[in-house]
Amino acid sequence: MAFAASEGNLSPALPLATLIGRELRGDGTERPHVRYGHSGFAKRGEDYFLVKPDCLRVPGDPSSSFSVFAVFDGHNGVSAAVFSKEKLLEHVMSAVPEGISREDWLQALPRALVAGFVKTDIDFQRKGETSGTTATLVVVDGFTVTVASVGDSRCILDTQGGEVSLLTVDHRLEENAEERERVTASGGEVSRLNLCGGQEVGPLRCWPGGLCLSRSIGDTDVGEFIVPIPHVKQVKLPNTGGRLIIASDGIWDALSSESAAQACRGLRAELAAKLVVKQALKTSGLKDDTTCVVVDIIPSDHCSTPPALSPKKNQNKLKHLIFGKRSHSSVGKLSKSASLGSVEEIFEEGSAMLEERLGSNFPPKANLPPFRCAICQVDQEPFEGLMTDNVGGCCSTPSTPWGGPYLCSGCRKKNDAMEGKRSNRSTTCR
């Protein structure tokens, strides 16, 4: 996926090492403070959120700290949302190689997020429950922000001059033509609810199951073409910091991205989250669960809100990110660094193909066992359900070559099912 912007807003491409080097050397950008607040109202009680502000990449080393924030909007029960809140971060971190540098950790993170989302989905579906959930997970490390999402719980970024950017893609079938094409190509049917007499009503849904989303965690009762593979975006904020607003669709169905950002500028994060929820309820009433997490990334020489977020008149403009298909040669490369105003784009990818998502962005210095599954992180003996680039395993066929890293037989079955290569329930790893 590529960011489309006018040439006047583009800055020279900067590799990740350069951006991090500036931060580590100081250059006026010491590690920022992170402040957060959350608020919400329940209608069905299926929204959950996660706040972990003091994670350590290296145990006992405060300089390796990072923060994690997430929103989960469950449907058909709370089980998938609760399970994802408890397990998703653990599965993501298990896919990050140990003993790597900060630069390599940030480079490995997009790949680890994909593996963590898929493993969470596999483990939950093994429970045999039919619940599902959206998931938007945000990792803040210094001024670098990495966002992974499935479903329609959105994350926006508000920065200098009132410029608002979307860091996620909504996986709603009604609005996402690429996802409709992918679902139908994988064997799903996309249509509206058909009433007696042939009248079609409501939003586009995927059948079987009738889900309005094309990506989620869980949803055992729908086809495997509803995938847990997240859209991932990684950006480097300017040294003026910024504000993240992460919220469920109960907020975004009532407020535009710009309206949500405008509603809370100049306020501390806790009050900002409450005001966004209040504004959404005022606009459309309590039609759905509403959950909002506000995260302020504040320069070390400020103590409350980012200086760029004080209210300013006539400076609010919404910068939409236009997502198109990348060429295969550019998939997953971190060397591309477009500018979102004063925000450096480090990485973005939204492909639903595991081979593309797991086969790139991996630190070359990572010393991993050759037969460790890239998704479930289980070591296997050679030829025990083997599936790598050049060696076929128990699930491989000449017509379905695998060009990605090693997958165990269970995870390869999951991949084949998501791509429509296997029947979707009796043969997948449940």
Image: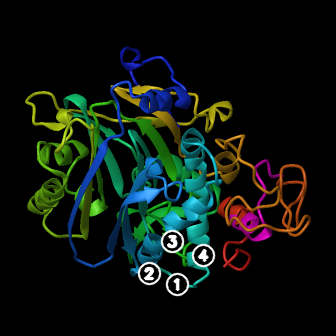
Q: Position of residue 395 (x, y in %)?
A: 84, 66
Q: Residues within 10 Å of mark 1 (few under 14, many from 20)?
A: some
Mark closest to the chain's N terminus, 3 or 2: 2
Residue at the image position 40 percent from the left and 79 percent from the top = 76
Q: CA distance from mark 1 to mark 2?
A: 8 Å
Residue 129 numbered tag = 1
| Residue 150 visible, this angle | no
Q: Nearer the viewer, mark 3 or mark 2?
A: 3
Residue at the image position 61 percent from the left and 58 percent from the top = 115
Mark closest to the chain's N terminus, 4 or 1: 4
- Amino acid residing under circle 2: Ser
Residue tagged 4: 123
- Amino acid residing under circle 1: Glu
Residue tagged 2: 79
Q: Position of residue 405 (x, y in %)?
A: 76, 52
Name, please, the residue furthest toward the bottom.
128
- Amino acid residing under circle 3: Lys
Q: Position of residue 266 (x, y in %)?
A: 11, 42
Q: Are marks 4 and 3 in contact (CB under 8 Å)?
A: yes
Res 38 quadrant in image: bottom left
Name, please, the residue furthest toward the front.
60
Mark closest to the chain's N terminus, 4 or 3: 3
In screen coordinates, is 22 left or right of 282? Answer: right
Q: Are marks 1 and 2 in contact (CB under 8 Å)?
A: yes
